[in-house]
Image: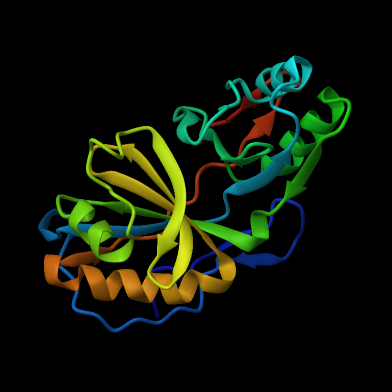
């Protein structure tokens, strides 16, 4: 059974939740430790995913989002607004669409806070169950990405802080350059097993280590701004 076969309590129910990779089984040659690996793969399950739609030209809309999330709304493809300490990010997806990711358990409060703050024409959709995040790190992670996507991942074209949606393997993924040597893939649940196996196969030549799944601490939402309660 893969390291991803982990469960967590649904923050809104008394039933067990499974990550999109919970049932994945993989038989691959793995490095003995993360230190020996050229690529380290780790799932970050159970994060909160929200899709926000609205008018970027509306100052009230932009201001309302910033008051709730504590981050400015990105107005173009590329730069991702991100607060690592609180585990909150906003990524531009199209001229009127953004992907918001918050810590586990915060998505319900964040959605409610946005609905309370925003007015006019907008939409907030909770897509938490339909996506997961894979973290890729290590000295060979850029070489791995070059095998998986036609998008130019050289630092000149893809600096730290950038995020885009692109073809990945025979599917697609949201690719985010978090810091030097660390990237994130936001992938759909329906393609999670396929993309995970593709990544392990593509990374095998570099030495791949599958790290234990990592879920961020559950958090809470204040009336103004998402605040993460660290455990």
From the viewer's perspective, is residue 29 above or below residue 115? below
Lateral position of residue 50 relative to residue 203, left or right? right
Front residue of this view, candidates 31 and 38 = 38
Lateral position of residue 170 relative to residue 201, left or right? right
From the viewer's perspective, is residue 11 above or below residue 198? above
The location of residue 123, given as percent across then percent down, is 81, 40
Extreme residue toward the right, this view:
120
Its colouring scheme is rainbow
What's the residue at 69%, 37% (across, down)? Answer: 96
Lateral position of residue 47 relative to residue 173, left or right? right
Location of the N terminus by quadrant is bottom left
What's the residue at 82%, 25% (across, down)? Answer: 118
From the viewer's perspective, is residue 128 above or below residue 16? above
Q: How many marks?
A: 0
Q: Which quadrant holds residue 46? A: bottom right
What's the residue at 40%, 64% (across, down)? Answer: 168
Extreme residue toward the left, this view:
36
The location of residue 73, given as percent across then percent down, is 60, 25
The location of residue 201, given as percent across then percent down, is 26, 76
Lateral position of residue 9 relative to residue 24, left or right? right
From the viewer's perspective, is residue 41 above or below residue 192? above
The location of residue 231, given as percent across then percent down, is 51, 36
Question: Can residue 44 be seen at all in this image of the molecule?
Answer: no
Q: Which quadrant holds residue 35? A: bottom left
Front residue of this view, candidates 183 and 5 = 183
Q: Which quadrant holds residue 38? A: bottom left
Question: Can residue 90 be seen at all in this image of the molecule?
Answer: yes
Front residue of this view, candidates 205 and 45 = 205
């Amino acid at each position: 059974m893969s390291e991803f076969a982990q469960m967590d309590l649904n923050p809104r129910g008394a039933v067990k939740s499974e990550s999109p990779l919970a049932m994945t089984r993989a038989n691959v040659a793995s490095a003995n430790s993360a230190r020996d690996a050229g690529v380290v793969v780790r799932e970050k399950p159970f994060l909160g995913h929200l899709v926000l739609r609205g008018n970027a030209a509306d100052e009230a809309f932009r201001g309302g989002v910033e008051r709730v999330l504590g981050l400015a709304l990105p107005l173009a493809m590329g730069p991702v607004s991100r607060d690592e300490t609180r585990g909150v990010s906003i990524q531009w997806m199209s001229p009127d669409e953004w992907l918001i990711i918050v810590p586990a358990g915060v998505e319900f409060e964040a959605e409610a806070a946005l609905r309370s703050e925003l007015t006019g024409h907008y939409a907030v959709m909770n897509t938490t169950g339909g996506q997961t995040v894979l973290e890729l790190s290590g000295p060979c992670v850029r070489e791995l990405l070059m095998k998986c996507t036609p998008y130019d991942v050289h630092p000149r074209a893809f600096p730290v802080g950038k995020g885009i949606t692109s073809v990945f393997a025979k599917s697609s993924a949201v690719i985010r350059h978090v810091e030097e040597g660390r990237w994130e893939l936001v992938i759909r649940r329906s393609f999670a097993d396929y993309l995970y196996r593709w990544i392990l196969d593509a990374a095998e030549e570099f030495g791949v280590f599958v790290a234990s799944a990592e879920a961020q601490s559950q958090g809470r939402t204040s009336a103004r701004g998402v605040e993460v309660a660290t455990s």
